Amino acid sequence: MRVTDDPLIPVMQGDEGKVIPKSNAQYGEVDYKMLEKNAKAKCILVCALGPNEYSHISGCTTTKQIWGILVNAQEGTPQLRKFGIARLCTKYEAFKMESGESLQDIITRFIIIVNGVVSLGKIC
C-alpha cells in the first residue's frame, strides 16, 4: 500500500456478483492487517507534522487525502511552481556577494537557492 493509493476497504461478493463493503463483524485477520497498515501510514504522516501543517489535514480521513494536501502545500499548483521556478532562477542568475557578507553566508544563501530550484524539478 502506498500513501498515494485510495484506502483499502474490506469487501466481499454480494448478491448478483456485486462487490460490497464488509461489516465489522465479517472482518478477518487479513482485513485487520490491511486496516492496520492504513492506520500506521496515517499516524506516521500526522506525527511528522507541525501544528501549522496539522491544521490543514486535521479533517482528512485517508492517507491519500493527507498526502494530496501536503504535496499541494509544499509544491503548490502548477502555476505557483512555474512562478517559484522563475523567481529562483532569477535569483540564481543575479547571484552576487552582498556587502559585509561572509563567505559562509554566501555559500548558505547559494545552497538555499539551488536546493529550492532542484526541489521544484528544474535546473537553471
Image (cartoon, grey):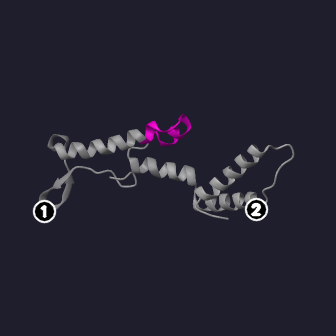
Q: Is residue 103 above or below residue 91?
A: above
Q: Nearer the viewer, residue 30 or 14?
A: 30
Magenta stretch bounds: 45-59
- Residue 70's disc number: none
The residue shown at (34%, 41%) is 40
- Callout 1: SS: helix
Which numbered mark, 2 or 1, is in the foreground of this view?
2
Q: Earlier in the sequence, mark 2 or mark 1?
A: 1
Q: Is residue 99 magenta?
A: no
- Residue wearing tag 2: 93
What residue does disc 1 label? 16
* Residue 31 x, y percent position in the rendering: 21, 46
Marks 2 and 1, how far apart at CA? 65 Å
Residue drawn at point x = 13 percent, y = 62 percent = 16
Query: x and y percent of residue 68 in the render?
Result: 47, 52
The residue at the point 23 percent across, 44 percent down is 33
Crowdedness of circle 2 by 10 Å Cα count: few (<14), some, many (20+)?
few
Q: Residue furthest left?
A: 15
Q: Amino acid at mark 1?
A: Glu
Q: Residue at x 52, y 38 (%)?
A: 55
